[in-house]
Image (cartoon, rainbow, N blue to C red):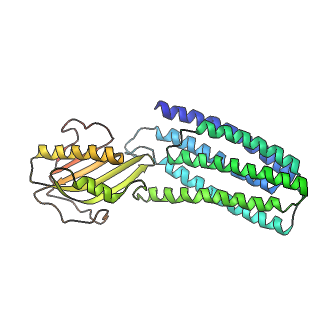
Amino acid sequence: MERVSESGGRLRLALALTVATLAVELAGGLFAHSLALLSDAGHVLADVFALGLAWFALEQSRRPADRRRSYGYQRVGILAALVNAITLVVIVLAIAFEAVRRIMVPQPVQGGVVIAVALVGIAINTFVLLTLRGHAQNLNLRAAMLHVTGDVAASVGVVIAGAVVLLSGWYYIDPLLSLAIAALIALGAFPIIRETVNLLMEGTPRKIDLGAVTRQITRTPLVTGVHDLHVWALSPDEVALSCHVVVDDISLGDAEHVVRDLEHRLCDAFAIGHTTIQVESCHPCGEILHGAGEHNHPHEHAVFTSTSARPGPPRAAGSSAQPQ
């Protein structure tokens, strides 16, 4: 909780500094008639949106689970990251449209103003990056840092463009650089969209090898098979698993020991902290390939079900076990 609070404070500071950068670049871009600087301001606007949503999502994730949200509010961060990425795509389209228009009809740009404003943006965004460094382990904070990193790179390009205009008067550099900034924004947006959509579709997290999970389960003593295996992410940092395991004909107490062993193995090997494991022995249902979503009928002959809510040492025997 202390780390979450610290991250929230850093995000608030980063948000305030980024709003200041937006004001400076927007005013400078309008004054200098520079599309490159206005494009950079558009990227900074996305930064403001990203940091604001990241802070909001972080605050929401601290809310405890309730009857309506039994898993808590951690997925707010996923939704925020998706909104951020979609916003970037809209900004890319707007920049590209204006850049093409200016290539057809070049407009004069004040290179000195462009350089000065871009340097201010570089200084502020570099400080923001240093502020957020070490606190981007979840998807939403990573998306926010990606915004800011891209903006630093874009501002460096704006400085170069301003120098070209100042020294040679070649105004085409301004819209051409704007297109490059748009491409940079797009490259950052699409991976975030892909990952958030996978999470919302409850796809297997990229860091999890489902085959390796299957092998880990079947190597557990007394386990003879596994099916109906599902692994998904509750949030970018929290992974859940459910499966049916077939075991030898053993007592309920021994079945509980098997489940506790599995919880330890899955936590240690894959950092899976939420597990729901159904044990079958006398009347196991038919073998199904892992990930078979259609296999959801009731199991009248299931012997034992266990749910683990978080990683760590095994809970006391019987804490979540109940015969069916």
On the question of residue 324 being in view, the answer is no
Q: Position of residue 315 (x, y in %)?
A: 24, 36
On the question of residue 221 being in view, the answer is yes
Q: Position of residue 151 (x, y in %)?
A: 69, 49
- In the displayed structure, 277 sits above or below 96; it is above
Q: Where is residue 235 in the image (x, y as percent from the top left)?
A: 44, 48
- Please report the residue visible at 67 percent of the width from the left and 61 percent of the height from the top: 183
In the picture, measured across the screen, residue 12 lies left or right of residue 158, that is left
Quarter of the image for residue 133 reads top right
- In the displayed structure, 188 sits above or below 272; it is below
- Please report the residue visible at 50 percent of the width from the left and 35 percent of the height from the top: 4
In the picture, measured across the screen, residue 24 lies left or right of residue 258, that is right
- Please report the residue visible at 22 percent of the width from the left and 44 percent of the height from the top: 261
Q: How many marks?
A: 0
- In the displayed structure, 249 sits above or below 295; it is above
Q: Which residue lies furthest to the bottom in this view?
A: 104
Q: Where is residue 161 in the image (x, y as percent from the top left)?
A: 81, 54
- In the displayed structure, 74 sits above or below 315; it is below
Quarter of the image for residue 193 reads bottom right
- Please report the residue visible at 52 percent of the width from the left and 40 percent of the height from the top: 58
In the picture, measured across the screen, residue 198 lies left or right of residue 186, that is left
